[in-house]
Image (spheres, rainbow, N blue to C red):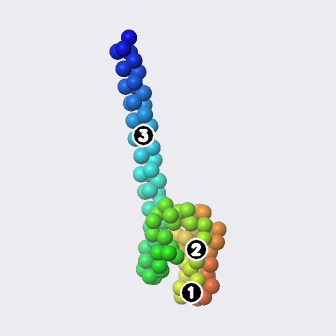
């Protein structure tokens, strides 16, 4: 009888391990998607010396951004990749030289 109990525990552990591995794989895949979508925007910000407090460099933090203040940066354009910020609801652009959005 004890053997069956131990076996059941091993099966439960295997299921938990499989679920854990699946969870970790989902995290890795999400990070890869975010990197593909948002790294071009981060690269654009860095090439223009835009401070990290204005545009976060952390992928998760940037993905969760609801507002960006890019006022007074002398920007003439915005990258297409800004469209990948799906949570963005506020974009402050005063003091720039934008000719199109």
Return the mark for residue 48.
Answer: none
Which of these two is toward me, 14 or 75? 14
Label 1 residue SS: loop
Q: Are marks 1 and 2 in contact (CB under 8 Å)?
A: no
Asked whether residue 101 is in view, the answer is no
Q: Position of residue 76 (x, y in %)?
A: 55, 85
Task: Judge whether 7 appears above or below 31 on screen.
Answer: above
Residue 55 on image: x %, y %: 50, 73
Question: In this picture, is 95 found above or below 14?
Answer: below
Residue 68 circle label: 2
Disc 3 packing (10 Å; few <14; some 14–19; many ≥20): few
Per the image, the residue denoted by label 3 is 20
Q: Residue at x 43, y 57 (%)?
A: 32
Q: Residue at x 39, y 35 (%)?
A: 17
8 lies above or below 94: above
Q: Which residue lies at the image location 56% right of the left edge and 66% below the top edge?
A: 65
Q: Quadrant of residue 2?
A: top left
Alpha carbon separation for disc pair 1 and 2: 12 Å
Q: State the CA–CA distance, disc 2 to disc 3.
A: 35 Å
Specify few, some or many for label 2: CA neighbours under 10 Å numbering under 14, 14-19, or 20 or more: some
Residue 25 point in image, percent of width and height:
42, 46
| Residue under label 1 | 72
**Crowdedness of circle 1 by 10 Å Cα count: few (<14), some, many (20+)?**
few
| Residue at far front of view | 2
Secondary element type, mark 2: strand
Q: Earlier in the sequence, mark 2 or mark 3?
A: 3
Q: Nearer the viewer, residue 81 or 74?
A: 74
User: Which percent across, then down, holds residue 41?
Assistant: 48, 71
Q: Residue furthest top?
A: 1
The tag earlier along the polypeptide, 3 or 1, is 3
Callout 3 secondary element? helix
| Left-right relation of 24 to 100 | left
């Amino acid at each position: 009888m004890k053997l069956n109990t131990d076996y059941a525990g091993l099966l439960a552990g295997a299921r938990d391990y499989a679920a854990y591995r699946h969870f970790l794989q989902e995290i890795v895949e999400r990070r890869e998607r975010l990197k593909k979508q948002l790294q071009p925007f981060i690269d654009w910000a860095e090439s223009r010396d835009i401070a990290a407090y204005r545009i976060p460099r952390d992928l998760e933090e940037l993905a969760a951004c609801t507002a960006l203040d890019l006022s007074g940066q002398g920007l003439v354009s915005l990258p297409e990749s800004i469209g990948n910020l799906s949570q963005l609801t506020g974009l402050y652009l005063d003091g720039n030289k934008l000719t199109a959005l």
